[in-house]
Image: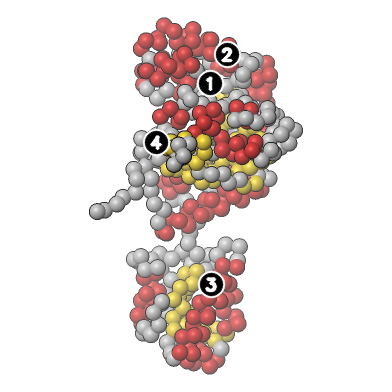
Amino acid sequence: MKFQVPRGTFDVMPEEAARWQALEARARAVSTASGYREIRTPIFEATELFLRGVGETTDIVSKEMYTFADRKGRSLTLRPEGTAGVMRALVEHGVAQAGRIHRVWYTGPMFRYDRPQAGRYRQFHQWGAECVGSAHPAADIEIILLLVDFLASLGLAGTTVQLNSVGHSGCRPAYQEVLRAYLAPHVDSLCADCRVRFEKNPLRVLDCKVPHDREIAAGIPSILDSLCAECREHFDAVQAGLTLHDVQFTLDPRLVRGLDYYTRTAFEVHDPSRGAQSAMGGGGRYDGLIADVGGPSVPGVGFSAGLERILMALEERSLTPGADAPLVYVARAGDAAVEAVAQQLVRELRREGAAAAGTAYAVIADLEPGRGLGAQFKQADKAGATLAVVVGADELAADAVTVKDLKTGTQEKIARAQLAMHLAARLAGAPAPNPTENAR
Ligand code: HAM
């Protein structure tokens, strides 16, 4: 029997892991630099949390959740997104309180039973940030800048910001009536989902993917014409802030996004060079969510970015967010004393190599002692090593090693005390290993 990864999921093999690590490291660095602190919540939550948080009429909740009963019959769901769980945690720990600001970020797998295609998976990974506790437009601007600046720092030029305001609980009902009045003559020709949405939550019709329904939705009056004075003022301030920071954006009054918790600001960042699945990330304000999941009335705003899509966009531009550390191969030839020193040297160099902020170099050696030097060098080559450190009887006597450049073949003797520093200096900026076969 042959097994395969489940449909819509993928393995990250060691060759690709360095790119993921570098992207995650960048996300961590930019989050930290803006005062955001990491939060880790479970991968599954009570199903009810997503019903209340994300909304029953959304595709995510009605069609895409991985829901199961545990052995005691409790309904649990693999998280389809991170925000609801993060808010649950802030409420549960009693820290979501009026007047207190929390800046948090998270990364990890999310699960949606979606139709898999390039850039759309059933298990995918997000990096997200949430600024909780401020209703001020400055928080919206901070959040949008965090995502935009992250993408720019990766070299992803040319992304576009789409911006909308979906109003708040005060002014949205009036727009829902405008929507119902507009949709009423067409309701029988809408898809079955939209007929339900028409009754329960007509705003969701704007997010329908069915071509006929999209045509009808194209003529819907703009939500921006229904905003109350406060929502309009908030929206103007967000736009002014983005302009001040030279962030280009386009207004898209049809942007309602796939989650029900948004109030006021909704935004997405797209890579126009990608056809479908061009959204690198998106988010918005959610002033009612914390109360909806049982907490106090505390506002918030945040975003999530899709890491697979960002990696694909980088790959298309031949940009690499990171590479494996250059590889050092310790070769040895000699008696038991040489063998012992070589084994100690591997461990010592591994410690030294990992001590730098990023791993300066990686160290491997033949697991089986006694193979000839030629065979060891061959192994080093296959693994893509840059340098070999050779230990033999002469080296042992001189408390030194021979460092061999595996590309040019040049060799030099280096005192053992100097070795770690020598390797770090020689390997700074050296290319990542390019193994000819899976020899590591
Ligand atoms: P979302 O728009 O559903 O928002 O997802 C954010 C990003 O996750 C998308 O822009 C996309 O890059 C990526 N993504 C979504 N679904 C998939 C998929 N099936 N395969 C690959 N990538 C995908 C949220 O999840 C909200 N929690 C964002 C938020 C945070 N709003 C406020 N705070």
Which residue was labeled with disc 1?
253
Question: How far apart are the two marked residues, 1 and 2, measured between alpha carbons?
Answer: 16 Å
Mark 1 vs mark 3: in front: 3
Where, by quadrant of the figure, is residue 283 drawn?
top right
For label 2, the SS is helix
Q: Is mark 1 within 8 Å of ligand 1?
A: no
Mark 1 vs mark 4: in front: 4
Mark 4 vs mark 3: in front: 4
What residue is rendered at 56% in x and 41% in y?
A: 128
Residue 283, relative to residue 364: is it above or below? above
Q: Is residue 33 visible?
A: yes
Within-10-Å neighbours for mark 3: few <14, some 14–19, many 20+: some
Within-10-Å neighbours for mark 2: few <14, some 14–19, many 20+: some
Question: How far apart are the two marked residues, 2 and 3, measured between alpha carbons?
Answer: 63 Å
Sequence-wise, the earlier of marks 4 and 2 is: 4
Mark 2 vs mark 3: in front: 2
Question: How far apart are the two marked residues, 1 and 3, measured between alpha carbons?
Answer: 55 Å
Q: How many marks?
A: 4
Which residue was labeled with disc 4?
113
Sequence-wise, the earlier of marks 1 and 4 is: 4
Q: Which corner quadrant holds the C terminus?
A: bottom left
Residue at the extreme right: 99
For label 3, the SS is helix
Which residue was labeled with disc 2?
173
For label 4, the SS is loop
Look at label 4 and name its amino acid: Tyr
Look at label 1 and name its amino acid: Pro
Residue at the extreme left: 1
Which residue was labeled with disc 3?
350
